[in-house]
Amino acid sequence: MRVDDLARFILAREAHRKGFTPDPIIREYRFCNVRREDDRVTKWIAENWREPRLTDPFLWFAMAVARLLNLPDSLSAIGYPVPWEPERVKGFLHARKKLGFKNFNAAYIVSTNGVKMDKIDYICDFVLSPLWRKRVDIAKALDGATLAKAHAALEAQPGLGSFLAAQLVADLKYTPALVAANDWATFAASGPGSRRGMNRVMQRDLKAPWKEADWRAAMDKLRPALLKKLPRSLKNLHAQDVQNCLCEFDKYERARLGEGRPKQKYVPHEEKKA
């Protein structure tokens, strides 16, 4: 396993977060933080929606809205979305669109799944409104569940899928519903980037496929080995953070090896245009 290489990337990315950037690739391109909770969007969601409403039984639904849009400006415009008022939310989002503002963060691919209609209307009417109608049953399914069972319950909902379900679990694991899950530190679901990243670390062919059970078994092997290479400040990395690091490591290796370039250049947030 290329555990040392992955550990070096993680240490370099964490050094960048703290203001020291020795690695030229990390200095040039945008990479997510080692800990998802340190990412700017996650911090906004946590501070403005998640933490103030930890006792809301339908906080899970607000997290679904948050991750489907995944953009603090649009989330701030619509306000906390419980109770769900689709026409009001669509009005705000369409108004922003007419003014030329973005409503969706390009970091997550959210589509209309082949339906030819405006994405705002599709997300509100065909994804979020059906979720809201099932809010009580889904809240019961999540309460006290393992992260694996919570992921399965969310993944089964139309319009979410494995990737978005895993993002919701990553938010909800810090709430009363899932904070005591016995797989809190060890659960993760793979995505395309983390499967490629795992191939690099396990020294497999880059395009080699993974069965999900095999990928999770590889994660169970990788994470303990990785934590031994990291300083005390990073010893608490959970599997979902490691999964994210694998995705970012794949991006890093593509740039380092000349296989391609990450889509976004690094721009300090305070320098970005409004």
Image: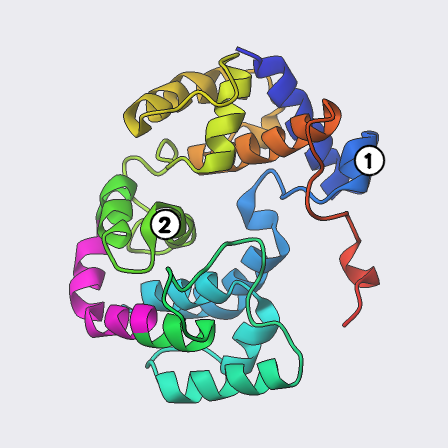
Q: Which mark is residue 236?
A: none
The image position of residue 86, as x and y in percent, is 36, 83
Above or below 227: residue 181: below
The residue drawn where x is 46% and y is 22% is 223
The answer to whether one can see residue 78 in this image is: yes
Q: Amino acid at mark 1?
A: Thr
Range drawn in magenta: 126-144
Viewed as shown, does residue 181 lie left or right of 45? Answer: left
The image position of residue 58, as x and y in percent, is 29, 69
Viewed as shown, does residue 113 lie left or right of 150? Answer: right
Looking at the rendered structure, the secondary structure element under dot 2 is helix
Above or below 54: residue 99: below
Viewed as shown, does residue 243 lie left or right of 58? Answer: right
Task: First in sequence, mark 2 or 1: give its number.
Answer: 1
The image position of residue 176, as x and y in percent, is 32, 56
| Residue at mark 1 | 21
Which quadrant would residue 191 be assigned to in this image?
A: top left
| Residue at mark 2 | 169
